[in-house]
Image: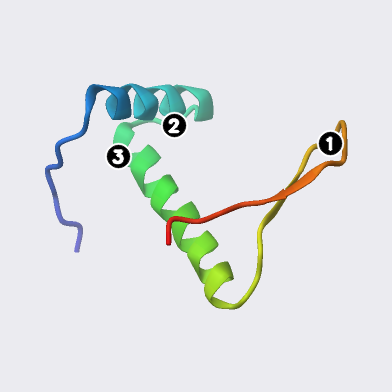
């Protein structure tokens, strides 16, 4: 069952969430947070399985490993 929570964010974090919401065309901040949680969960699952997530620049083919929160 969904649970409503209240969190306190810095002004900068709120601006970043609002910017991300607009860039992604999402209907709400809540959807933006849910999407961010899903991505963080996916990245952490990959890390737990011993995998790396690699970002490749299409123009230069330069690669770098994405570092997760923990």
Answer left or right for 18 relative to 64: left
Give the answer, above or below, for where 21 lies relative to 53: above
Q: Earlier in the sequence, mark 2 or mark 1?
A: 2
Contact (CB < 8 A) between labels 3 and 2?
no
In three-dimensional space, the C-alpha distance between marks 1 and 3, rounded to whole angstroms, equals 31 Å
- The image quadrant that residue 61 belongs to is top right
Most extreme residue toward the bottom is 49
Question: From mark 2 to mark 1, how far is it between C-alphas?
Answer: 26 Å
Q: Is residue 55 left or right of residue 32?
A: right
Vertical placement of residue 68 versus 60, above or below:
below
Q: Which residue is mark 1?
A: 58
Q: Which residue is painted at 59% across and 78% down in the image?
A: 49
Residue 2 in picture, x, y percent from top left: 20, 57
Give the side of residue 10 with respect to residue 46, left or right. left
Name the quarter where the C terminus is drawn: bottom left
**Callout 2 secondary element:** loop
The answer to whether 31 appears left or right of 5 in the picture is right
Residue 7's x, y, as percent? 15, 41
Q: Which mark is residue 26?
A: 2
- Using the numbered discs, state the Cα–Cα distance from disc 3 to disc 2 in whole angstroms: 9 Å
Q: Residues within 10 Å of mark 3 (few under 14, many from 20)?
A: few
């Amino acid at each position: 069952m969904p649970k409503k929570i209240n969190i306190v964010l810095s002004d900068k974090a709120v601006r970043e969430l609002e910017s991300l919401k607009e860039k992604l065309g999402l209907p709400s901040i809540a959807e933006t947070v849910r999407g961010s949680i899903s991505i963080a969960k996916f990245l952490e699952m990959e890390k737990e399985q011993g995998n790396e997530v690699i970002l490749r620049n299409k123009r230069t083919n330069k690669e770098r490993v994405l570092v997760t929160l923990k």
